[in-house]
Image (cartoon, grey):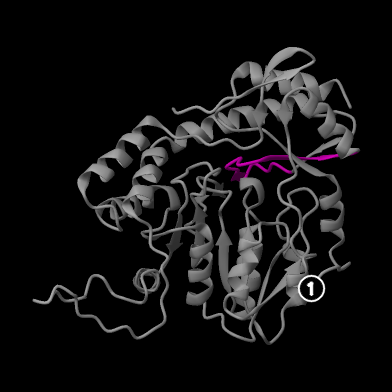
Amino acid sequence: MARNDKTANHGNVATRVLQVLRVNVYEEAIERAVAVLRSGYIGQGPVAKELEEYFRQVSGSPWNTTVNSGTSALHLAVILAGVDAGDEVITTAQTMMATSHAVLMQRATPIFADVQPLTGNIDPKDIEHRITKHTKAIIVVHWAGYPCDMDEIHAIAQKHNLVVIEDAAHAIGAKYKGRPVGSMSPFTCFSFQAVKHITGGDGGMLSMLKETDNAEASRLRWFGIDREKRKPTLLGEHEWNVTRLGYKYHMNDIAAALTLGNLKHLDEILGRRKEIAARYRRAFAGVKGMTLLENKNDRQSANWLFTVLVERREDFLRLLHSQGIYASVIHLRIDRNDLYGGERRDLPNLEKFTELHVSLPVHEGLRDEDVEHIISTVTKGW
């Protein structure tokens, strides 16, 4: 595995800097990318196709389309869900802006529901009263990799004839009641951005339950051109007929090679993160001023983050930073940006979550002694 460890001087003692997020690139991924670079063909090609086929094992869906970012996957999902100008999409503000940007890109309006105080996930109990005649879809975010209450959300969607889109940027490999995230809703969006579990430098995947949606996504990601049906000509330029606006959202084979090479190690990555999270849970149970998030037996988190709720958060962060532990708030609620309307007070659980949440390092780059250093520092108090 390629490493990017750093050291810092804390009190004249050299200490490893323990980053909250860390880029992990396996040698296999590097070798695959080099092979593509040497092949003479680096655009969307056979490696992207191989990645799509391999990803079936991860998503549990037979239909997977590679794209150049998780944001592109979200935008295509919103388009395929039929969202257009004047529509509304119920979603969460506890996320990166990409989730709701995809809605705005269709000239629709994101409607923010509250979160559950002990998961950071959208609260199904706060969804239904926000549904109007303009509501077209629900976008959920599996915060930190912990799956949302999908049965309850699907029941609401079915009752009101709404499309469910899952933002699974944090949740590759997560499971809900034995089902992989990616196999439950019409559209599930994954990210291979630089600091995700699996990176391709950047990139994304759109997993779908219908073959027709997959075919349309494949066209839309490349200007609306059907690459499978275009016809070669003597002139060299293929013949095609574009009938719908498309985008330049396709993934190239360099990114696909990096993603595929890293993806082969997903079980190893998830296993290490699960082990670290379990150690934290045992050690932090009962720590004064700290509340652990929910961890139900009916679902498996991907543990992209290990988020906790902490009193006197700034004191907590100062202590950890002084010991070379770079815990961080990820992410601050997006609804207070002017783009989304600015200040609001109708999300009380999110108010509390925003004041208290912070994430600790949980990645596979941590050594056992690093984990013990984090535990020791936290349990001494702040």
- Residue at left offset 90%, top offset 30%: 288
From the image, tell me which residue sits under label 1: 341
Q: Which residues are magenta?
A: 294-311
User: Which image quarter holds the C terminus?
Assistant: top right
- Residue at left offset 58%, top offset 49%: 170
Front residue of 333/247: it is 247
Secondary structure category for the residue under label 1? loop
> Is residue 119 covered in magenta?
no
Categorize mark 1 by other alpha carbons within 10 Å: few (<14), some (14-19), many (20+): few
- Residue at left offset 63%, top offset 83%: 87
Magenta stretch mostly in which secondary structure? loop
Q: Quadrant of residue 282?
A: top right
- Residue at left offset 72%, top offset 83%: 132
Q: Quadrant of residue 339?
A: bottom right
- How many marks the image carries: the answer is 1
Image x and y of residue 189, in percent:
51, 59
User: Which image quarter holds the N terminus?
Assistant: top left
| Left or right placement of residue 370 versus residue 311 in this view | left
Q: Amino acid at mark 1?
A: Gly
Q: Is residue 281 above or below residue 61?
A: above
| Left or right placement of residue 133 versus residue 249 in this view | right
Front residue of 294/22: it is 22
Image x and y of residue 292, in percent:
78, 38
Front residue of 135/297: it is 135
